[in-house]
Each structure stands twice: as C-alpha cells, then as structure tokens.
Amino acid sequence: MTADPIRLLEHRHDESRSPFECMIRRHHPRLRRFANALLVDRARVDDVLQEAYLKTYRRSPRFANEQHELAYLHRVVYRCCLDELRRNRRSRETPVGDVIELGTTADPLARTLAEEAWSELSDNDRAVLLLVDVAGFDYGAAARILRLPRGTVASRLSTARDRLRGRMEDA
Amino acid sequence: MRDDEYTRRVVDELHLQPESPRFFDDLQLRLARGERDAVRRWRRTAIAAVAVALVATAVAGVAVATPTAAANTVDVTVACPNLLKGGVGVFSVFASPTGNPPIESGKIKPPPPGFRPVDGLTVETGDALYVLRLTSIVAGYQLDRRQCVPNRTKLKLGPNGLPKHVTLQVGDNDYGERCADVPKVVMRLRIENDAYGAPVRTRLLIVRAKTNKPLIYVDWSRQRVTAWDSPSCDFTQ
C-alpha cells in the first residue's frame, strides 16, 4: 500500500509540502506554547507534541476550516498532555530544570514568581486559562475541547483567574 | 488590566523549553516507522483473510468473492484484555463515516501510493495498539487475534440503556471516546459487507468483561455514525 512511507516532512524546505505538514507547521508555535504551559515536566514537551501529531496523522481527520483544525489539534495535544501528567503523577518524579534554566525573559524574578504561581494551579485551571485567555477560544470551543459543559468552563475560568491573581499576589 | 491580558502576561513570563533542532526530523522518523508498522499489520490481515477465504471456498465449493458475489455478514464476539496506560487498562473507540468506496473496473480503487485509507471505525488499547480497524474504502477488516480471543458471552446489539452521544454525517468531525480503568472488555462486532467485501454497516458493542456492563455502542455506516457511550468513559481521560 505504501512502499514508500509518506514523505510528510521530507520536503519541508521546498514548496511541495504535504497538507498535513502545512497544517502542523501553521499551528505548531501555538500548540507548543500550550503544551509548554500545561506540562509540569517541560523536558517532555517535544515528545508529547510528537505523540499528538502522530495521533492526528493516524486519524487523518478532515476539517471544515482552520479554526476547526486548530481546535482539534488543541484537543489532541491536551489529551496527550493529560496522559503525560498522569504518568508523571504516578511515577512521582519531580521535574527539575524548569525554573533553574535561564529563559529569555528580561526580568528573572518576575519569571520565577510567574512560574511559581502558575505551577500551583491545578491542571484544569491551567487548561481553561490557556484555552480561553491565551489561545483565544470562545467558551463553546473550549467546552468542546475539554469535554465539559459550557457553564462549567465559564465558572472554572472565573475561579482559575481568581486563583492565578491570588497566587501572584501572594508570591 | 483585563483578566485575559493578565493571564497572557503571566504565561509570557513562563520559561519556554527550547525546541530540539531535530524535532521535525524525529517526527518524520516516527511517522515513517508508524507507517511501516501499519503496512505490515494490514498485510498480515490481508494474508490471513485470503487464507480464510480460500479455505472457505474449498469447503463450500463456492466462487471466490467477486463484485458479483453476494454480500456477507460477519458476526463475532471476542474478549480483549486492555493494555495499560498510566497504570490502568485503557481502550479508545474512534468512528467516522467514510463514504462510499471508489469503484473502478469492477473493483475498489486502491488509494494512490503514499496515501493511507482513512479509518472508519477503530478500537485501540493502551498506547494506540489497534485491536479493530475497518473502513468503507478498503475490503475486509482488521481484528487483532493475538489480543482478542473468541468469547461465548451473548450480547444483544443495541445501546442497552447507554445514553446517546452523537450522530455524525460524512464530512463531520470524528467520534472519539476513551474508557479508562477497564482491564478487559468483551465486544460483539457485526459487519455487513457489500459484494466487494467492503463494510457497509457495522455495529459494535463493547462491555466490561467482569460485569457485562455496556460501555460503548456504535452504529457505523458509510454515511452516518451514531454512538452511545457510558458516562464513565471520557475522551479526556
């Protein structure tokens, strides 16, 4: 059937990129930012994203528009992140390096405070904040991604925002 | 400052893990490896299906299935242990109406080189091991007999009290559901094939092996998919 494995990424420097590759590259920066902020162990971001892209490729979904594909990809990445978080909790490993590594932020103190406040939020809080406030999904789209009722998303968002502000102020 | 701006500002302060320079190269390798594995699985299934068909032909003395042969139905009940993911047995069901197969010169036209047929109905366990895989645009189906063994449990095909989840038409997004903490399932699968051997309609009921409690029921056809599932199953699990 496919003697030659599908060359999805082989010609990425050419014009002849496959639709799948174009789609992934179009949304990769946003998805990367999403996964990075959602995961506790950030060293696993690359693996989790690759797993999510593999799943998407295997499913070969069809999309009505770009917004639809973005929501779908967020959903798959979110699911893979949850798997990773669950694995992480079970192994009870404490990731290191998140805060110690130097980032590009100008204010290292602000970064550390933000890291601290952010990491104290629950997975659910982080997910809803990222989807609505950062990725810009409306409540309906976020509800579909999280598989929650719309009202639950709204209330969780409000609570998560309060928690984040509270944590930042405490820090 | 607005709430969403505040959140964005905090997230901007987070350290972004630098991306591996080999990210896309690694992804390409994983895709190619996955594709090769998929091809091998399909090939094994095809060989097994041909062998079974030849034996059946010899025994029954009927013609090998051709486009003029009669449609047939497969009805099997199997028990499948679920592979662990995150320490618990997990399985997922995905379904999507894949439309009618392209027919050319009295045969189903194979997909062009480099294109994999779109899955119509799949059951996966653990970290994406396919237990069941079928589509309307390829004849036959793939059932992992190493993972699943025949079972005598009598299951009535139908929602069995499960709440309806969704109905999808061609072109809609696909249905996906995951059930966690299920060590073993029994599933009944009834596939109605057309004269080309491609599935026209498939009904799939999955129950918890220990209690026979229904978890997922999917009525799949080429144009429409309707799914019922237990509230204990959740795509985000």
Image (spheres, rainbow, N blue to C red):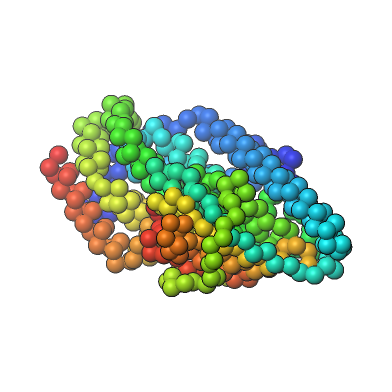
Could you say which quadrant of the image residue A154 lies in?
bottom left
Above or below B236: residue A111: above
Give the percent coordinates (x, y) of residue A106: 28, 32
B189 and A90: which is toward the camera: B189
**At 35% across and 42% down in the image, what residue appears?**
A85
**At 30% across and 48% down in the image, what residue appears?**
A123
Give the percent coordinates (x, y) of residue A36: 37, 40
Q: Is residue B218 visible?
A: no
Specify whether A69 is left or right of A11.
Answer: left
**At 60% across and 34% down in the image, what residue appears?**
B29
Q: Which corner quadrant holds the C terminus of chain A?
A: top left
Give the percent coordinates (x, y) of residue A169: 13, 44
Give the total of numbered labels: 0
Specify whether B62 is left or right of B185.
Answer: right
Could you say which quadrant of the image residue B104 lies in?
bottom right
Give the farthest residue toward the left: A170
**At 64% across and 57% down in the image, what residue appears?**
B134
A98 and A27: which is toward the camera: A98
Above or below B196: residue B148: above
Give the percent coordinates (x, y) of residue A131: 36, 54
Above or below B151: residue A101: above
Above or below B190: residue B43: above
Q: Is residue B157 visible?
A: yes
